[in-house]
Image: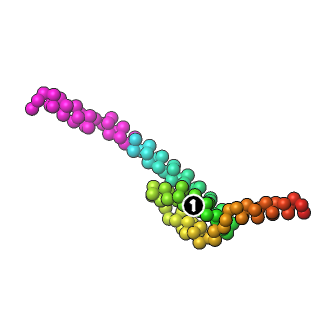
Amino acid sequence: MEPWIQMALTIIVTVLACNGFWAYLQSRRDKKDAKTRMILGLGHDRIVAKAMEYIERGWVSKDEYEDLNKYLYEPYTAMGGNGTVRRLMVEVQKLPIRDLSYTQQAKHIQEAGVNNG
C-alpha cells in the first residue's frame, strides 16, 4: 500500500475514533434539536393564538386563512408538530370566509357609530 494512502487512512481512523469529534457532532445535534423545539414552540403558540382569535370571532378572511395555513401550519406539521394544532385548524376550516375589505368597512362604520353616538 502506498505510504500516503496509509497515512490518510490513519488520519481518518484517528479522527473518527476521537471522543472530541463525536462530542462535537453530539453538541451540533443537541443545538439543532433545541432550535427545532423552539421553532415548534413558537409556531404552536402563534397558530393557537391566531386560530382561537378566528374561532372566537366566528369567521376568517381568505388572506388570514391562507397565511395561517401556508406560513405557519404547513411548516409546523412538516417539522413534526402535534395534533392540538391540527384540531384547531379543522375548526378554522369550518369557519365562514368573509372578504377582508367588507370587514374593514364594517369596522369603520361601527367605529363611526361609536364616535357619533
The residue tagged with tag 1: helix, strand or loop?
helix
Write down the residue under mark 1: 66
Q: Position of residue 63 (x, y in %)?
A: 61, 60
Quadrant containing the C terminus is: bottom right
Q: Position of residue 48 (x, y in %)?
A: 59, 60
Q: Residue furthest right?
A: 117
Q: Number of labelled discs? A: 1
The residue at 36%/37% (across/down) is 24
Q: What main secondary structure does the magenta stretch of the protein show?
A: helix
Left or right of 23, for residue 15:
left
Quadrant containing the N terminus is: top left
Tell me if I can see residue 23 in this picture: yes
Left or right of 34, for residue 116:
right
Q: Amino acid at mark 1?
A: Glu
Report the magenta residues as a range: 1-27
The residue at 57%/61% (across/down) is 66
Tell me if I can see residue 56 in this picture: no
Q: Position of residue 42 (x, y in %)?
A: 55, 52
Q: Is residue 17 magenta?
A: yes
Left or right of 26, for residue 35:
right
